[in-house]
Amino acid sequence: MNQTRRQRFRHFIGFPASGHHAGEQLVATLGGAVGIVLVLAVTQALAGPTAALVIVPSMGASAVLIFAAPHSPFAQPWAVLAGHVLSALVGVACWRLIPNPTLAAGVAVGLAIGAMHVARCLHPPGGATALAAVIGGVTVHDLGYRFALSPITVNALIILAVGVAFNYAFPWRRYPASLMRYRHAPARGGSNWPPIAGHHVMAAMDHLNVVIDVNPEEMGELIQQTLDIAQRDRDGRLPEVRLGRYYCNDRPGQQWSVRQVIDERRSDNPEFDLVIYKVVDGNGLNRTGSCTRTEFARWVGSELQPRSGPG
């Protein structure tokens, strides 16, 4: 399989191009272990070891989200708590109202998804909670609707409390995501890209009708950082601007212009170096102006050499 086919296959199966850092992987592993140990201990005490084997797996799935993807919309407290509780109520109702266990299980999961959508608390592990209410056996069935309160609500609160406390030790993964505070750098001079806010991302998601497993603020920060890195990468390849040289913007028609650098003001920080230029041909002829060296370099399309002697 050549490189192109390998890349297409990886794209087809959704294999990620990059993974988390080793430290992040370790943190998620430890957090998930601590959370589930506590949940399992409480569930065994409340419902017995047999019922715990059916109930706890859905909390294991919640632990993956809370500790491995703490900023995901699916992992936020409302999604975790309301998603599990609603799904548990739906599951119990389906078990009581639908005699066929197989049909009851399927309807329970489907209705749980619908209920979570309506309540805006979509939490994938909720489907397992609804299923457990149907196939959990006598111990679970005897609880009736109390199943949604204990052990489900109790378990959800435990896993949430562990998620908040455990992630608090790591500033880059505050949980819930509302505790994160992003500081956007001001837009760079000369950049063609405006700052991106969370509502811009939400509008784009609505337009494309997609669901992304991170919150809009974090996605906006990711996009803004990507643009900033791309801008710095492009700035690293900018032409060198020198005193006395002639530069053209290489734009078509009336936008075409040639400038000569006639003076410069250097500073300790190269980002604040100023150049003074004069327009010697094209649009704005004989006009003078000044800007940072970087801004001028972004304007440059090519360097020109004036002809010497008769033309």
Image (cartoon, rainbow, N blue to C red):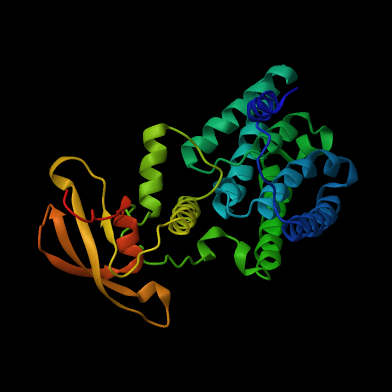
Asked if residue 174 can be seen in this view, the reply is no
Q: Residue at x 71, y 65 (%)?
A: 166
Q: Residue at x 79, y 34 (%)?
A: 136
Whether 238 is drawn above or below 3: the answer is below
Whether 279 is drawn above or below 4: the answer is below
Q: How many marks?
A: 0
Whether 240 is drawn above or below 5: the answer is below
Q: Residue at x 49, y 42 (%)?
A: 120
x, y (%) of residue 155?
72, 53
Observer-nearest of 52 and 213: 213
Instruction: State left or right for residue 48 relative to residue 84.
Output: right
User: For residue 245, which quarter of the picture?
Assistant: bottom left
Asked if residue 29 can be seen in this view, the reply is yes
Whether 20 is drawn above or below 106: the answer is below
Instruction: State left or right for residue 217 relative to residue 72.
Output: left
Residue at the outermost bottom position: 268
- Quadrant into which the N terminus falls: top right
x, y (%) of residue 169?
68, 71
Observer-nearest of 98 and 77: 77
Q: Residue at x 61, y 65 (%)?
A: 172
Instruction: State left or right for residue 218 relative to residue 5.
Output: left
Observer-nearest of 86 and 250: 250
Observer-nearest of 207 and 113: 207
Residue at the outermost right position: 49
User: For residue 34, which quarter of the picture?
Assistant: bottom right
x, y (%) of residue 207?
36, 34
x, y (%) of residue 244?
28, 68
